[in-house]
């Protein structure tokens, strides 16, 4: 289980995240939603330790991870995607999976050689994602959606217990979105815990076990999708154009 306790991230006078507490239960899909600028990505950045929190505690399976470096967090079993794909354009898809997993800490960078095991694992992941045909394609030739799928694959290289997906539906066409949803469901079915930040409400409501709503850096509601959807505070936050 992921537990966020009184998390805060301030940028000078801006309280991007303030006193946020919520949980993502093991084996469940939790969505973090909220209007633009609510603080969702900042919270994600703090949880994955790509950003140092100003205050608060983050616990993974009861152990604090908020003092760790990003690659150490990955080794504890938490992997994340980024809103904007961050690929190495000259490498093939297969190479990207392996190299990204090294960079993100599955194997230390001082072990630069690509091992047979890493290649095998990357091939298995590409097969799972139905993109084996892209294995030897240079990343620069991929569509945006294919790059998103590749990022998703890179995330799985570290054998995570929990994955954080930052806007998995963003900029993706409907058929690819359906594929991504299927993959998320399949992985969750295998016991993987999922935390997503997403603006596509249809996706959030159909996919999530629990929805956590942020506005102005604070949590304003938390509960099952049907409950959150009708919460007056949530409606006001969205309709108020905050
Ligand atoms: P969106 O849905 O539009 O991606 P969000 O909910 O992810 O928004 P954040 O990107 O976390 O929101 O931003 C929260 C607030 O913090 C915003 O007011 C933003 O301008 C501010 N902010 C984020 N990063 C920084 C930064 N590095 N320096 C200063 N302010 C920042």
Image: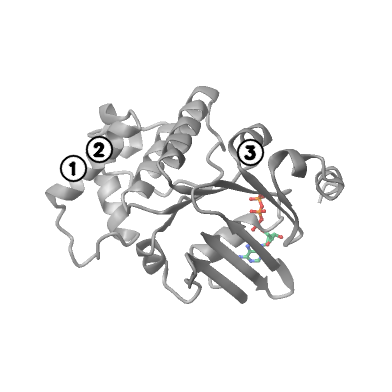
Question: Which numbered tag is attached to residue 120?
Answer: 1
Q: How is the image coloured?
A: one colour
Q: Residue at x 67, y 58 (%)?
A: 39
Residue that sits furthest to the top in the current view? 175
Q: Secondary structure at mark 1?
A: helix
Instruction: Tell me the element at label 3.
Output: helix
- Residue at horizontal 53 percent and vertical 64 percent from the top: 47
Q: Gap in Å between the C-alphas at discs 2 and 1?
A: 6 Å
Task: Establish whether ligand 1 lies closer than 8 Å to the Cβ of label 1.
Answer: no
Can residue 92 be seen?
no
Q: Earlier in the sequence, mark 2 or mark 3?
A: 2
Is disc 2 in contact with disc 1, using a CB cutoff of under 8 Å? yes
Where residue 65 sits in the image (x, y, percent)? 47, 71
Residue that label 3 marks: 204
Residue 213 picture location, percent across and down: 71, 51
Q: Residue under circle 2?
A: 124
Horizontal arrangement in the rendering, residue 160 relative to residue 62 (left or right): left
């Amino acid at each position: 289980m992921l537990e966020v306790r009184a998390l805060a991230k301030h940028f000078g006078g801006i309280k991007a995240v303030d006193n946020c507490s919520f949980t993502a239960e093991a084996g469940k899909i939790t969505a973090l939603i909220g209007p633009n600028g609510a603080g969702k990505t900042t919270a994600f950045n703090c949880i994955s330790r790509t950003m140092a929190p100003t205050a608060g505690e983050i616990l993974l399976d009861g152990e604090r991870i908020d003092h760790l470096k990003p690659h150490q967090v990955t080794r504890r079993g938490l992997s994340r995607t980024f809103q904007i794909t961050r690929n190495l354009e000259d490498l093939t898809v297969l190479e990207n999976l392996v190299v990204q997993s090294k960079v993100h800490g599955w194997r230390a960078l001082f072990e630069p050689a690509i091992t047979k095991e890493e290649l095998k694992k990357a091939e298995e992941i590409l097969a799972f994602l139905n993109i084996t045909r892209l294995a030897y394609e240079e990343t620069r030739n991929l569509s945006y959606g294919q790059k998103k799928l590749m990022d998703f694959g890179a995330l799985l290289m570290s054998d995570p217990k929990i994955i954080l997906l930052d806007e998995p539906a963003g900029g993706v066409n409907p058929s690819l979105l359906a594929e991504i949803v299927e993959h998320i469901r399949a992985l969750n079915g295998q016991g993987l815990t999922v935390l997503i930040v997403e603006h596509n409400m249809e996706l959030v409501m159909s996919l999530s076990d629990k929805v956590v709503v942020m506005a102005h850096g604070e949590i304003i509601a938390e509960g099952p999708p049907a409950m959150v959807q009708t919460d007056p505070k949530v409606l006001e936050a969205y309709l108020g154009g905050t």
